[in-house]
Amino acid sequence: MGRPVITLVLGGVRSGKSEVAERLAGPDPVTYLATGLVADDDFAARVARHRARRPAHWATVEEARAVPQVLARLHGPVLLDALGTWVANDLRADIDALVAALTTRPGDTVVVSEEVGLGVHPPTELGRLFADALGTANRRVAEVADRCLLVVAGRVLDLPAGGEAGEVAPLPTSTVPSARAPAEPAPAEIETAPAGGGLRQAIGFLTPLGPAVVPGPEAFAWFPLAGALLGLGSGALWWAANEVLGRLAGAAAAVTADLALTGALHFDGLVDSADGLLPHLRRERRLAVMAEPCVGAFGVAAGASVLLLRTAALWALAGRDGTRPLLLGALWSASRSQMAVAARALPYARPTGLATAFLGSGRPTPIALAGTVVAAGLAAADGPRLLLAVAAAAGAGALVHALARRRLGGFTGDTLGASGVVAETAGLLVAVALVRR
């Protein structure tokens, strides 16, 4: 296995640079990292053309601002399109973090960007800032790129390495694809998922531990066990923090540790879902709001409320018989189980997105049975009454899915995360009521 390759594809508007990049990425499973925000009908039509042109088995991840962070977590070949829209979304884009992600991530990366000198920018201070920022980003990426291509009117030129003199000549058609005729791509050297099967895929997707992956459908079968392991890990940290710091600080530390163990993935979904599901909006606007990088009032309120309730619940549970790691294992398993069941049973509300990578044939019943066995077993080992807390968690998650189905037409990755956080929190509160009786 060779070193991952970074390729920068530059070009002007409608030059064919995206088509060239798509062919360079190859026909094997690729993650398409899109940085554009759909703001008008023209851009929406352009996005639709790009989507129709890409292979159906490619996964699409949409991120307008936190591009370096998302890129670093993706495993396998990635096509990043494009730097121009990323910089336009944030003129203070962290180019150092982008370069670090490109040079350290485990997979080939094809980066598309607009060449500043081939575009028209308004003679304003904002326009000049954009041109400076994008020019800097292009130059920094070119410094670390193994290949740098310039696309002009569908023709591809190979740019020499930095510091070399000489004229730029077209690459032979046998090695560089044009925008009009596909060429044979180089075989991908990195798989889209690590060896080890569904459990490692589930852990890699649900946590920041190990290499980040775009999981396949088989990962869903391991969600109950992955959730149980996460819950038991959080429970162990809760026990240790309670012993050292006391009840209140220990509870707060446990909540913080759980956010770290999950990479705040589900919490982010809760915040985005609150902004999209709770206000009075049209369905299309709800999905657009959930894709935006900013957080609104509903998201802030939901996030703060959940953190307070979880901290208070852990504090109350530790007051009588000590901490309950087995309970957390049961609730965390139940929350991931209902997420997997919903993803099998409900339609996907977006045409593209990270969740498309693990959609596929399969019935939710085996996952539901596995989740019931794991969660019920852990809860019963802690106390038979706590089976009611597990049932409450599953019911709370189902309510979130019902709301998403009603207002979005199905689920998204954000609503799955929100259902998990709501399920765990509801289960903790019911457990407090049961233990205090």
Image: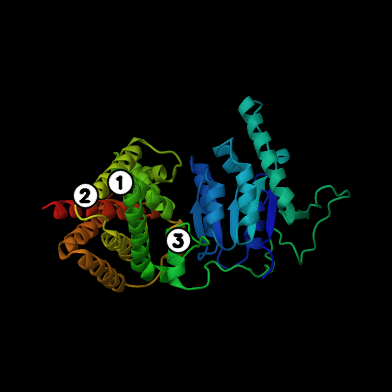
Q: Earlier in the sequence, mark 1 or mark 2?
A: 1
Residue occupied by mark 3: 205
In three-dimensional space, the C-alpha distance between marks 2 and 3, rounded to whole angstroms, equals 34 Å
x 37%, y 64%: residue: 229
In three-dimensional space, the C-alpha distance between marks 1 and 2, rounded to whole angstroms, equals 10 Å
How many residues crowd mark 3 within 10 Å: few (<14), some (14–19), many (20+)? many
| Amino acid found under the numbered disc labelled 3 | Phe
Where is residue 341 drawn, in percent x and y? 31, 65
Q: Earlier in the sequence, mark 1 or mark 3?
A: 3
| Amino acid found under the numbered disc labelled 1 | Gly
x 80%, y 63%: residue: 172
Q: Classify mark 1: helix, strand or loop.
A: loop
In three-dimensional space, the C-alpha distance between marks 1 and 3, rounded to whole angstroms, equals 33 Å
Q: Nearer the viewer, mark 2 or mark 3?
A: 2
Confirm or deny contact between disc 2 and disc 3 (CB under 8 A): no
Numbered-mark total: 3
Q: Residue furthest top?
A: 124
How many residues crowd mark 2 within 10 Å: few (<14), some (14–19), many (20+)? few
Q: Nearer the viewer, mark 1 or mark 3?
A: 1
Q: Is residue 156 left or right of residue 364?
A: right
Q: Residue furthest right?
A: 166
Residue occupied by mark 1: 246
Q: Can you say whether 380 is above or below 163 in the image?
A: below
Residue occupied by mark 2: 319
x 20%, y 55%: residue: 321
Where is residue 281 drawn, in percent x and y? 32, 40
